[in-house]
Amino acid sequence: MHAGLELHHIFPKNLLYKAGYSRPEVNSLANFTFLTKATNIEVTNRDPLEYIPKYEELHPGVLAAHWIPMDPELWRIENYLEFLAERRKLLAAAANSFLDELAGGMGPDIEVGPPVIGDRASGIAVDLGEDDESRVVTDCRDWVVERGLAEGVENYELVDEESGEALAIFDLAWPEGVQLELTEPVALLLNEPQEVGQAAAAYGFRFFTTVEALKAYVESEVLEAEAA
């Protein structure tokens, strides 16, 4: 990946979780594209129905370049699953076109099979790994439990105590610490925008952006202290 690009959820995770979509749906490959860091920050947590038409107006052709469906009805949160289905078709068509170009450049003695992504296969081929993040989070939670510590909460909703407003969704959290009431609140934030980390810090959470960093914290600051 180019150093200046970042992976971006077209439909923001927080909005989708609040609307009741599951983690595999939220993290479907069809919901990802690459943006510059500046653009990624600018559109973070914004409703696609708001920001998509703006960027198409400013940069004509940008939707086609990112294989984003042109139908505005598909940019609505309630139509998210239909958006995924349509974008899978666009991605599959682009992949098949690319394979056709490769096949056209090969020598005549090389036999080329049919495209690996077709109408029937697109759901499988495009969606491979769409729940990888879910498995990573669950494995991390289980790893902590196996070490005799508290079970974390997946998709933890951070709520303002006074207003009741949902502020952010953490991939995994221990609001009372990995050792209940003995250690600080901890959160795992994978591929989250800066604002989510700021919210976590503001509410007293120590947060980690990789599983490796969280495990290092558990081993060096929790388990070693417990054994001392």
Image: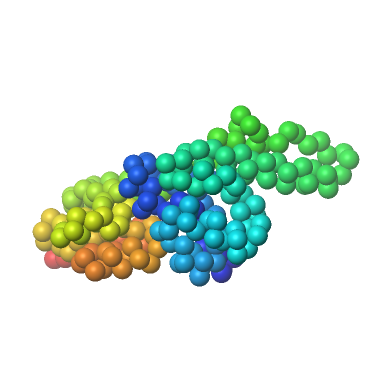
Q: Who's the residue at 61% across and 54% down the image?
A: 63
Q: Residue furthest left?
A: 181
**In the shown orientation, is residue 220 left or right of residue 25?**
left
- According to the image, what is the colour scheme of the structure? rainbow
* Residue 93 located left or right of residue 130: right
Please indicate whether residue 166 sits to the left or right of residue 192 in the image.
left
Q: Is residue 120 left or right of residue 12?
A: right
Q: Is residue 9 above or below residue 86?
A: below
Q: Residue at x 38, y 47 (%)?
A: 16
- Residue 205, by quadrant, is bottom left
Screen quadrant of the C terminus:
bottom left
Q: Quadrant of residue 183?
A: bottom left
Residue at image position (60%, 35%) is: 122
Q: Closer to the camera, 80 or 110?
A: 80
Task: Give the position of the N terminus as an image quadrant.
Answer: bottom right
Q: Where is residue 20, by image quadrant? A: top left
Farthest residue toward the top? 120
List x then y, in percent, for residue 31: 50, 48
Q: Judge whether residue 177 can be spotted in this image.
A: no
Q: Position of residue 112 (x, y in %)?
A: 78, 37
Q: Give the residue displayed 55% in from the left and 56% down from the top.
A: 53
Task: Say which of 47 and 170 sits in front.
Answer: 47
Asked whether the viewer can see residue 184, the reply is yes
The image shows residue 216 at horizontal and vertical percentages of: 30, 63
Q: Nearer the viewer, residue 24 or 90?
A: 90
| Residue 149: % across, % down | 18, 52
